Image: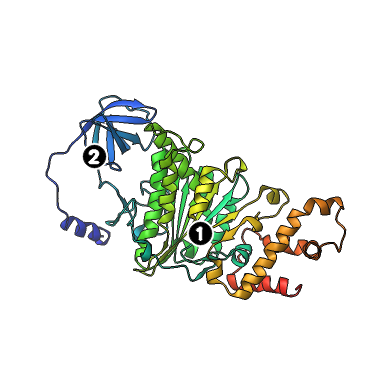
Amino acid sequence: MLNPAIPLLSRLDGAHPDFTPRRYGLVSACDGGLLEVTGLSVPIGAQCRIAHGAGSLAAEAIGFRNGNTLMMLLGDTVLLRPGARVRPEGRPGMLPVGEAFLGRAVDGEGKPIDGGPPIDTPREWPSGGVRAGALDRSPVRLPFDTGVRALNALTTFGVGQRIGVMAGSGVGKSVLLDMIAHGAEAEIVIVGLIGERAREVSDFVERHMHGSKRARSVVVAVPADHAPNLRIRGAMLATCMAEYFRAQGRQVLLIMDSLTRVAHAGREIALLLGEPGAARGYPPSALATITKLVERAGNSAASGGSVTGLYTVLADGDNHDDPVVDTARSILDGHIVLSRDLAQRGQYPAIDIAASLSRVMSDITQPRHQHFARQFRALVATYEANRDLVLMGAYRAGTDPQLDRAIAMHDQLTAFIAQPQRETVPLDSSVAALTALLADEG
């Protein structure tokens, strides 16, 4: 019976108790979720507990003003009262990581939401990551199998690459991520569901956290109704776990849905602190938040491990010049664009092949594969550019040989891109299908 308690007793044996008096501050003001605390000096990022009756509320330090500490609750302001005592807890700037999280679904604080026992781990990781030099990142040299035929064949990803899935709302970003999570080959899969619907969280956990995949998966979920700093903390926790396993030499797939919700959370915090909105209402610090997160993925030359990052980016109003979309596209190593027009025609996944790009494809694929991928892109782009003419019957066959071929192969090209949600197509099979399709027609 004592076996489960042995690790805890070992930790207590090596602990160094702190006998200094416990510090505390007092809540002096609350304005729109922003708290001012007097008499407590703690660093930014420190977590605190605010007493209220028999319970307590969690808060995080986000800044300073006029000698007071500015905090934001990690929950609702209900039951908060002036003069409530605020006590610091934990180590500032550190987040829990470790093998104990494998097979579990947790919130932004690392607490279980799957009904399982509490997670006890002695390991911590800096919330801002361990910064490495630019030359400490090894280049992308190995292809990454997503299990999606169109992505494997036409925008081949690499191990350690950072990719964005960009689209408006309701076009199929989450469904495509679900397909990749189901079919991808990776030792560890870390999924951050940040600012999304709670229903999607429960559906994702039900579909993926079972069988053999459960033992290599971690889900960090912070739905849209949670505090903005908790959403950012959830994104950081998922990234910290990916970095931790990469430091052990493992191949990690980090899926984050969505990067835009992280930017929205950063915008809420920055505006509360009085930072002026710059690019369409986004303060500079909000856009810098997503840049810092994305840059933490990649290959490690020291450990040999890798973090392949897959991020969804919501194009508000289907505007692909939105500041978040533009910032993400400039920092990522590739992007997949989903088209509402293609989705309305019944093509799923609705991948706009002509607008999608993998910046490392030429480094990880054979010249013959690249040749056929370029041919496929050209045929799709030619047909889409002349689609209205073809449908109106205004095009005369024989005028343009490239367009004639695109028209003749249109159904085959569309069928190649389309794929059922639960079907998995390996990388080799995807390339072979592309070669068979175009070599026979060439």
Whole-percent x, y for residue 321 in the image: 57, 44
Relative depth, front residue between 435 and 425: 435
Name the amino acid, label 2. Answer: Val
Q: Amino acid at mark 1?
A: Asp
> Left or right: 152 with respect to 216?
right
Q: Residue at x 23, y 37 (%)?
A: 87
Residue matched to label 1: 333
Residue closest to the eye, 384 or 142: 384
**Can residue 157 be seen in this snapshot?**
yes
Residue under circle 2? 42
What residue is at 31 percent from the left and 35 percent from the top?
A: 71
Classify the position of the N terminus by image quarter.
bottom left
Q: Where in the figure is residue 373, as x and y percent of width and height?
A: 65, 67
Give the image's coloring scheme: rainbow
Labelled pair 2, 1 in contact (Cβ < 8 Å): no
**Residue 212: x %, y % from top left:** 48, 65
Locate the C terminus by quadrant.
Answer: bottom right
